[in-house]
Amino acid sequence: MRRVRYLLLACATLALSAPAVAREKPSTPSAQIQVLLKSYGEKGLGVEDATVLIAKDGVPIFRRSVGLANREWGVKSDPEVKYRVGSITKQFVAMAVLQLVEAQKLSLDDPISKFLPESPPAWREITVRHLLVHTSGIPNFTELPEFDGRTWMYKSADDVVRLVRDRPLEGKPGAIFSYDNTGYVILGIIVEKASGKALGDYLSAQIFGPLGMSHTGFVSDKVLMHRATGYVFEGAAWNNTPWMSNVIESGAGALYSTVDDLLKWDQALYHPDRLHVADVAPMFTDYGNGFGLGYVIGSEGGHRVWWHNGHVGGFGAMLARYPDDRLTIIILSNDDDAHVEDLSGDLAALLLNIPKSPH
């Protein structure tokens, strides 16, 4: 799982390289989007295999797949394909925390030692809030030399804690922002301790089930119908990306989903009652570093945008919501180096008439 790319790049020109004879500009947004997707493929920007869903007011205005879900068998992608979504997982863990706060089973200002009694003395000042907004100071385990996703096939969240617990903090809790997968792994543990349920069971019962997200869950070795295979383009050939489980039921980035399920999630955030919380504003509040709870908080061309991406072993994902425009852009790809951030910015530029910047 790679560190999140902090800026939503707004990006490349929509047109293909100028031909000798000018082409007629596509007449509809759908046609323009298809031209844009084709240009990404021709430029080798890692979105040869992907599914894109764009919705306005919750209604899809574009829902299409390109490329292959499985290259060995030549299986074409389609909107029903399940992809790993990497760090988009963090949104669901953040919501689980807010639900448990609503149920008075924890507080954002609880010290994490309340739920992890084995915490070292250096962690005593760290609160649940610090974990949520990436200011705990706990080292990011995915950047440690001991971490190799291919050898962590069956590691647990407790293994992550053991890996980092004796290391010095990167700064005083609350003082330094540093994007941290470890914090969300620990949040997954806290959800389990506060709810009395395994993280997967809790999310299924309190979020996925109620929202009808029947094609979302934690990755495992079990056979999963319509699962995309992850690929990486190396040299001049496509190769399978080594399987990475990234810790069993990790709160940092171990979910799979579909574009339709992610749209259900996105739309539920406009209706907090569906999620059994009074207010989702904490999710979309900038706490001083351009981050909310599981979302990057920003703007593009005067339009507010709340987004997060995900990159993990052969997959790239992007979920961007423009709340004032009621526009949602979801991109799921099984290309390791998918430029989903760039593509999302270009799609927004096209649909919202936002000035583009080169990337």
Image (cartoon, helix red, strand yellow):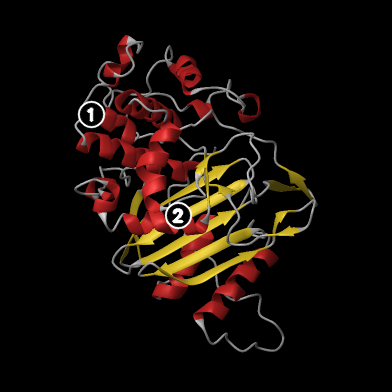
Does residue 113 appear to the left or right of 321 in the view shown? left
Q: Earlier in the sequence, mark 2 or mark 1?
A: 1
Does residue 226 appear to the left or right of 107 in the view shown? right
Separation of disc 2 and disc 1 at Cα?
Answer: 27 Å
Residue 26 percent coordinates (x, y): 57, 85
Q: Which residue is mark 1?
A: 105
Residue sitting at 69 percent across and 62 percent down? 67
Residue sitting at 38 percent across and 56 percent down? 266
Determine which quarter of the picture holds residue 175: top left
Residue sitting at 58 percent across and 71 percent down? 36
- For disc 2, the neighbor class at 10 Å (few under 14, some 14 to 19, many from 20) is many
Residue 138 percent coordinates (x, y): 39, 23
From this viewpoint, is residue 302 visible?
Answer: yes
Residue 148 percent coordinates (x, y): 62, 26
- For disc 1, the neighbor class at 10 Å (few under 14, some 14 to 19, many from 20) is some
| Marking on residue 64 | none
Determine which quarter of the picture holds residue 269: bottom left
How many badges with numbers are in the image? Answer: 2
Residue sitting at 57 percent across and 80 percent down? 31
Residue 190 percent coordinates (x, y): 34, 26
Determine which quarter of the picture holds residue 195: top left
Does residue 306 appear to the left or right of 239 in the view shown? left
Q: Which residue is mark 2?
A: 262
Q: Is residue 197 above or below residue 359?
A: above
**Amino acid on which disc 2 is placed:** Leu
From this viewpoint, is residue 175 visible?
Answer: no
Q: Which quadrant of the figure contains the N terminus?
A: top right
CB within 8 Å, label 2 to label 1: no
In-front residue for pair 246/259: 259
**Amino acid on which disc 1 is placed:** Lys
Q: Secondary structure at mark 1?
A: loop
